[in-house]
Amino acid sequence: MTDRAVVVEGLTKIYPRVKAVDEVSFTVDEGEIFGLLGPNGAGKTTTVRMLLTLIKPTSGRMSVFGIDGLTHPEKVRQMAGYVPQDVSVDGELTGYENILMYSKLYGVPGKERGRRIKDVLGYLDLQDRADDMVSTYSGGMMRRLEIAQTLVNRPRILFLDEPSIGLDPAAQRAIWELVNRLRDEFGATIFLTTHDMNEADTLCDRIGIMDKGRLVIIGQPSQLKATVGGDVLTINSKTPDCVNKLKELGYSIVSESLGGQFDLLVSNGEALIPHLLESLKAVGVEVEAVSLKKPTLGDVFLKYTGARMEGGETWIEARRARRTFRRLTG
């Protein structure tokens, strides 16, 4: 039987003017890469911070590897590593010094610190830059250093809050490869949050979709996409009354825009396109463009929440925010 790394039952966090997390329940298996996917403000980070015992839940229960987070928070913290969204390295220290500081905070015995720091620097491919100031690091190197800081304590579970936010595509792929290595080579349990649907689809064994504090559905990416029920066919038409004519022809419209773009949920989309175009032409609908795509996690989000998930910040915007934070705290 698979051991449970995380068990959450009815976890709730209420602030004075908002219910940030609303009776969330789920489990995470040991050795799994589990992700919470949702837009900014969905409650993902609040959930992680409660699991890390950094904030106290309003109600509910939670345990990490069988340790109750409410009664033994210090034990949970000792077995967990956490890489937050915001920059957590000091730009005015070297890479080695940053990890050394974390090793002391985690209580790593003095006689073991040097060996552990050397090990994580080598594993994260940072040994050649260990004595350089972190202010000279690229965004991807800084993210690897942040992960190295947490690994010095040899955590059983690693929490990554938006692990590739602010990184260019090449650095993002490197972080994804690292996350997979951490699980495959060390058996680490990975719990990540993201608003990047491609990241969730690529990395996660299972995904929980969060919206407005609630966990709306959970499952493997392929299973979730299969629940959409078909292909998504997008047509562009400015013909008046196009919506009613599509409905009269029996098509299910999952979304529409003011610019005359309509998403239809169909079966066997490739074969349907010629028939669709003929049918629309027969009822006086002029189609300007048509495209077909297989269901995505964005379509899953739309189905279960009734809205499109906003992409959030671009990587350029996120990187700029992380640089600003570094300047303010350096």
Image: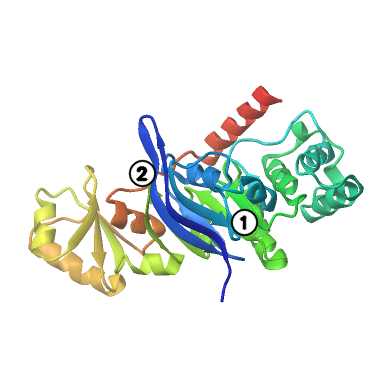
The C terminus - image quarter: top right
Q: Residue at x 13, y 56 (%)?
A: 285
Q: Is residue 127 visible?
A: yes
Residue under the point 87% across and 50% down: 118
> Callout 2: few (<14), some (14-19), or many (20+) C-alpha neighbours within 10 Å?
some
Left or right, residue 92 beside residue 268: right
Residue 133 image offset from top left, x and y in percent: 81, 33
Task: Determine the residue positioned at 13% across, 50% down.
Answer: 239
Mark earlier in primary sequence (1, 2) = 1
User: What's under tag 2, amino acid-wise?
Assistant: Lys
Q: Residue furthest bottom?
A: 1
Residue 76 vs residue 141: left or right?
A: left
Image coordinates for residue 84, horizontal then vertical, percent: 60, 41
Dots 1 and 2: beta carbons under 8 Å? no
Residue under pointer 2: 212
Task: Kindly report which numbered mark, 1 or 2, lies closer to the viewer in this rendering.
Answer: 2
- Label 2: which secondary element: loop
- The amino acid type found where label 1 is placed reads Trp
Q: Which residue is mark 1?
A: 176
Residue, far top: 328
Residue projecting furthest to the front: 71
Residues packed near mark 1 inside 10 Å, few (<14), some (14 to 19) or many (20 plus): some
| Residue that lies at the very extreme toward the right in this rendered image | 111
- Can residue 163 be seen here? The reply is no
